[in-house]
Image (cartoon, rainbow, N blue to C red):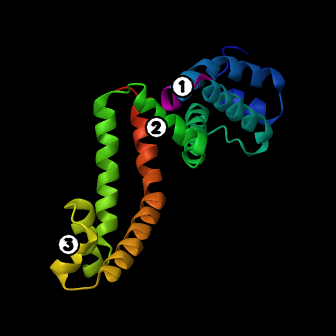
């Protein structure tokens, strides 16, 4: 049975033959683990991926199709598990803190620069979505460093209007970054975890 093709093993697993499952597991567990480890960089998460992939094979035995590539299915399942894990992790405060701490510990400056550029691009997109006057006030304050009084004098508006517009602009930019920065964090995390 050790020499059986993946197609034959798939058919046997579909019939709940445990020996066939064991052969498949022994054949692919190390390769799936290595692939998952490459994707996520965490031995624990890679091991979880292996367990999840093979558990699903056994639990969903009735849906297996011997005519389709079992190897491709295993690797795709591992990839999907890792990506799902990373998507969930990116929303975790612990992950964010760990990620930010990793920069302090000395991840490559090029990785940090890439992450910073991605966040800056997202921030500029947020600013471009602001109404014209709010956008101008925000840029004068945050980019050019003008005081609220200088902005009020330059635009001929009250200082209270400047404050109100800055509060609204800052709130919008923060919310926009919160919604969209998760993508930058995920992309940067993947770039850091996956060596070039």
In the foreground, 89 or 54: 89
Find disc 2 in the rendering and name its residue: 100
SS at mark 1 in the image? helix
Which of discs 1 and 2 lies nearer the camera? The answer is 2
**Secondary structure predominantly adopted by residues drawn in magenta:** helix
Secondary element at image label 2: helix
Image point (43%, 53%), residue name: 181
Which dot marks residue 37? 1
Q: Image point 60% across, 18% down: which residue? A: 30
Magenta-highlighted residues: 38-43
Q: Position of residue 129 (x, y in %)?
A: 32, 73
Marks 1 and 3, how far apart at CA: 54 Å
User: Which element is circle 3 on?
Assistant: helix
Measuring 23% from the left and 60% from the top, which residue is drawn there?
143
Q: Position of residue 91 (x, y in %)?
A: 57, 49
The reply to whether dot 3 and dot 2 touch (C-beta < 8 Å) is: no
Choose top left, top right, bottom left or bottom right for residue 59.
Answer: top right
């Amino acid at each position: 049975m050790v020499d059986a093709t993946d197609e034959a093993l798939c058919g046997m697993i579909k019939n709940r033959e445990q020996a066939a499952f064991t052969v498949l597991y022994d054949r692919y567990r190390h390769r799936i683990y290595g692939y998952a480890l490459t994707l996520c960089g965490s031995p624990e998460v890679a091991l979880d991926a292996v367990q999840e992939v093979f558990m699903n094979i056994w639990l969903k035995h009735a849906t297996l199709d011997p005519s389709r590539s079992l190897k491709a299915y295993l690797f795709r399942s591992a990839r999907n598990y890792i990506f799902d894990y990373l998507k969930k992790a990116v929303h975790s405060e612990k992950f964010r803190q760990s990620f930010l701490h990793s920069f302090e510990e000395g991840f490559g400056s090029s990785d940090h620069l890439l992450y910073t550029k991605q966040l800056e691009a997202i921030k500029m997109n947020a600013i471009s979505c602001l109404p014209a006057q709010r956008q101008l006030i925000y840029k004068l304050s945050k980019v050019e460093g003008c005081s609220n009084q200088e902005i009020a004098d330059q635009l001929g508006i009250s200082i209270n209007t400047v404050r109100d517009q800055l509060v609204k602009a800052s709130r919008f930019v923060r919310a926009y970054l919160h919604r969209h920065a998760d993508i930058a964090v995920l992309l940067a995390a993947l770039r850091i975890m996956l060596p070039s």
